[in-house]
Image (spheres, rainbow, N blue to C red):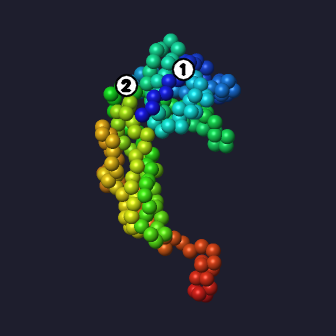
Amino acid sequence: MSEVKLTAETRTEFGKGAARRIRRASKVPGVLYGHGSDPLHLTLPGHDLLLALRTPNVLISLDIDGKGNELAIPKSVQRDPIKGFLEHVDLLLVKRGEKVNVEIPIHTEGELAPGGNLLEHVLNALPVEAEATHIPESVTVSIEGLESGASVLAKDVKLPSGVSLAVEEDAVVLQVLSAQAEEPTGEAAEGEEAAEA
């Protein structure tokens, strides 16, 4: 997995006004916590952080002024609902070799069996436990030839070595729905209503 280096500054100003000033300077307020230590309030470089967060569960090496280096993973990211810019980030302190619980994106490959069936992602991300410095970016699941009624369970997903499930083995990850089970729409629905009348 990728490790991104960022320089961070500790901050002593809090509240909305201080946060607005930080964002006006193209920076992002954040907090680093974990391992029983007191939360550390930081100011992070906005553009570099935005690029880093494009990778799910990215490992961030923080060079904090006066505090040395720390490793962290993003735990919670707040964005402006309209403009999409970063408003705040919570970072979880991790150590090399430590296991952490994270959710990794699920990608699919292959084609469903013919018949116009629909694939439903019951889970958009798979909860797993992995070493903090070896979190997989994603998992890929084959849906080749799956027919209506078929489902993929968590235990069916092939995980990289050193990664284990953090969810019930029988949890449904993906399922194939019959296209005919959908509610009729448009003219078809009107036709049925007319027939009932």
The residue positioned 60% from the left and 78% from the top of the image is 189
Where in the figure is residue 69, as x and y percent of width and height? 45, 18
Q: Name the residue under label 1.
A: 7
Instruction: Looking at this view, name the residue that lies furthest to the top.
Output: 66
Q: Report helix, strand or loop for mark 1.
A: strand
Find residue 29 and report its image quarter. top right
Q: How far apart are marks 1 and 2 (CA)?
A: 18 Å
Q: Is residue 59 visible?
A: yes
Q: Check residue 154 in the rendering and tell me which mark sits there, or answer none.
A: none
For residue 194, which quarter of the picture?
Answer: bottom right
Q: Which residue is drawn at 33% across and 45% down?
A: 159
What residue is disc 2 on? Answer: 95
First in residue order: circle 1 vs circle 2: 1
Q: Nearer the viewer, residue 7 or 87?
A: 7
**Residue 57 relative to residue 49: left or right:** left
Q: Nearer the viewer, residue 103 or 115?
A: 115
Horizontally, residue 95 falls left or right of residue 17, namely left
Relative to 105, is 87 above or below? above
Looking at the rendered structure, the kind of residue marked 1 is Thr
Instruction: Report if the CB atoms under discs 1 and 2 are less than 8 Å apart.
Output: no
Position of 130 relative to 67 (above/below)? below
Of residues 74 and 38, the one nearer the viewer is 74
The C terminus: image quadrant: bottom right
Image spot of residue 37 (x, y percent) = 42, 22
**In the image, is residue 100 above or below residue 180?**
above
